[in-house]
Image (cartoon, rainbow, N blue to C red):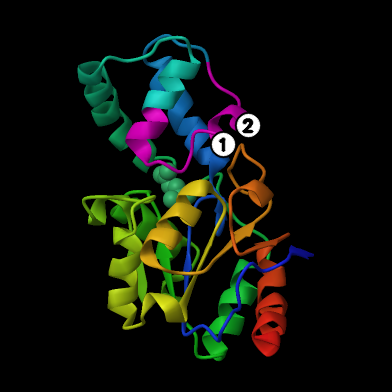
Amino acid sequence: MNVGASRPFRPQRAILFDLDGTLIDSAPDITAAVNELLAGRDLAPLRVDQVKAMIGGGVKKLVERAFAASGSPLSSSALEEANRDMAPIYRRHLTGLTRLMPGVREVLTHFHLNGTAMGVVTNKPQLATREILLHFHLTDYLGAIVGGDAVTHPKPAPDALLLALDQLGVEPADALMVGDSSSDVDAARAAGMPVVLLRGGYTQVPVEELGADLVCDSLLDLPSTMQRLQAAA
Ligand SMILES: O=C(O)COP(=O)(O)O
């Protein structure tokens, strides 16, 4: 099922995937990390659904939002300190509770066999991103892996997407961004790329309202949907 494409799709030479909420369900691990940090400050744990709504802006934003939701908003110096404390905690909770979203391996295999270049562009730190992708044996599919700290301006700025496309040697108009949130749409628009959003990711706003060219129920719908749209273009 999809919501109508808002512009013609031409065959894509590359696809950039968001990570959290798109390729992986990392919310349980991220919640465990957040709650370990909060417990260190005698604050009560947050639920996974609360933390889901805080993911997508990088680790520092996550920390800021978690303390605000706990009724203890941080000053900028306290945020810096909490963010420093979070780094080793976050690294201990990368894969234990994290699972691939449905269809990831099948869909990456499909596009790989198709000759489509692929990359991951996330606001998660680069080292953590690489460790997770290695854990799930996905790095062989990916010609570019760009974390939030690999650029000065992470998503929703276009920089990380443009860096990944540069590494893949593909122009923005010949590539597609696939994500789950407004920062993916905004980054893709700023980079001049079409964008597909998947339902079931980490957004509080319904994906239909985020201005994507297309919305799919799951990653598994992407190959057939792309074929149909390209045939019609
Ligand atoms: O906020 C994060 O750490 C990562 O989020 P993203 O993979 O959706 O960009």
Above/below status of 118 relative to 17: below
The quarter of the picture where residue 51 lies is top right
The residue drawn where x is 28% and y is 29% is 83
What's drawn in magenta, residue-wise?
45-63
Asked which secondary structure carries label 2, the reply is helix
Q: Which image quarter is the N terminus in? A: bottom right
Q: Would residue 33 be found to the left or right of residue 168 on screen?
A: right
Amino acid type at circle 2 is Asp
Q: Is residue 51 magenta?
A: yes
Is any part of residue 9 visible from this angle?
Answer: yes
The picture quadrant where one finds residue 223 is: bottom right
Q: Residues within 10 Å of mark 2 (few under 14, many from 20)?
A: few
Identify residue for label 1: 52
Q: Are marks 1 and 2 in contact (CB under 8 Å)?
A: yes
| Residue at 51% across, 47% down | 182
Choose between 143 and 155: the one closer to the eye: 155
Q: Mark 2 sits on what residue? A: 49
Residue appearing at x 53%, y 18% in the figure: 45
Q: In the image, residue 193 lies at what x, y percent? A: 45, 69
